[in-house]
Image (spheres, grey):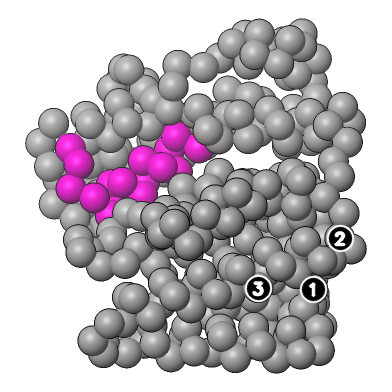
């Protein structure tokens, strides 16, 4: 997680009230969210579910999601973002590795908690928030333990629940989401419409038409957005040189990077960094 202080648990908690629509995005880290009040909907990798009090969602790194909130009953939720590797490493937690990676495929990405289970996870979330705000000895150990506990309760509920995780992979919409996920995973590599076409064994013209229909953008434009979005994060939250950032986000030519960046932000990468009170680090 960019900006994480060395030696600290890669874990962050926030309380959010999203706007009417939070557009499609993804993270390099895992995100556990828990709705405290309000109603709305969330789409994860193209599968939409209801949001209401007690809904808990777990997004794995690079899962693509968007959220809509009711204007009359807006969503308020806690969001815990963390490096997924903190869930692993102990032999007594082998079950975690066995099940966690099935979320979004064999297991759903969410569960609606009710009754005693709702009370239990609400209490746990409260304990996590309280511990997160403190700086007592053993804080990180307790946070990791509470996180493992709440994720374990979520996995139990998913295994016992009735939410369907079945996905129609051949449906055009799911094809688009599979392509989107592939692009999100490989955007910093030299991929093109033709390479995407070859990977999915689909005609480039079909992918182009279908992608534009569902996203409103071309494959190339969407990839530029991902790269420039990542670049803005690195410019403001890292000490990387601008030339290294250019390569990191997938551009092998600085001139192209600078041109596309200016098209999106109306200024050069160095001016953008300076405008966010960061020193310009020489290439």
In this rendering, position of residue 129 left or right of residue 112 = left
Q: Residues within 10 Å of mark 2 (few under 14, many from 20)?
A: some
Q: Mark 2 sits on what residue?
A: 163
The answer to which of marks 2 and 1 sits earlier in the sequence is 1
Residue under the image location 77 percent in, 78 percent down: 113
Q: Is residue 120 above or below residue 13?
A: below
Image quadrant containing the N terminus: bottom left
Q: Is residue 209 magenta?
A: no
Mark 2 touching mark 1, by CB under 8 A? Answer: yes
> Gap in Å between the C-alphas at discs 2 and 1?
9 Å
The quarter of the displayed image where residue 157 is located:
bottom right
The answer to which of marks 1 and 3 sits earlier in the sequence is 1
Q: Is residue 212 visible to us here?
A: no
Q: Mark 1 sits on what residue?
A: 112
Picture coordinates of residue 80, whole percent (x, y): 50, 70
Magenta stretch, overall SS:
helix
Picture coordinates of residue 59, whole percent (x, y): 61, 56
Residue 153: numbered disc = 3
Q: Residues within 10 Å of mark 1 (few under 14, many from 20)?
A: many
Q: Is residue 134 visible to us here?
A: yes
Part of the protein shown in magenta: 226-241
> Gap in Å between the C-alphas at discs 1 and 3?
12 Å
């Amino acid at each position: 997680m960019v900006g994480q202080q060395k030696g600290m648990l890669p874990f962050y908690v926030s309380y959010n009230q999203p706007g009417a629509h939070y557009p499609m995005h993804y993270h390099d880290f895992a995100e556990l969210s828990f709705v405290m009040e309000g109603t709305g909907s969330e789409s994860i990798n193209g599968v939409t579910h209801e949001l209401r009090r007690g809904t808990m969602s777990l997004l794995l790194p690079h899962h693509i999601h968007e959220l809509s909130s009711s204007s009359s009953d807006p969503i308020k939720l806690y969001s815990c973002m963390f490096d997924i590797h903190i869930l692993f490493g102990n032999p007594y937690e082998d079950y975690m590795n066995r099940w966690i990676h099935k979320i979004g495929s064999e297991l759903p990405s969410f569960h609606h908690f009710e009754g005693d289970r709702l009370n239990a996870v609400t209490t746990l979330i409260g304990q996590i928030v309280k511990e997160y705000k403190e700086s007592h000895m053993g804080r990180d150990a307790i946070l990791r333990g509470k996180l493992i506990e709440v994720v374990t309760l979520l996995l139990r509920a998913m295994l016992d629940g009735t939410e369907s995780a079945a996905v129609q992979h051949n449906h055009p919409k799911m094809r688009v989401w599979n392509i989107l996920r592939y692009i999100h995973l490989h955007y910093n590599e030299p991929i093109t419409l033709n390479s995407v076409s070859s990977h999915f064994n689909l005609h480039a013209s079909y992918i182009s038409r279908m992608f534009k229909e569902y996203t409103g953008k071309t494959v190339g434009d969407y990839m530029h957005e991902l790269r420039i979005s990542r670049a803005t994060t690195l410019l403001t939250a890292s000490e990387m040189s601008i030339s290294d950032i250019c390569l990191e986000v997938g551009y092998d030519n600085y001139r192209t990077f600078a041109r596309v960046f200016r098209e999106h932000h109306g200024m050069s990468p160095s001016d953008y960094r300076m405008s966010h009170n960061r020193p310009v680090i020489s290439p």
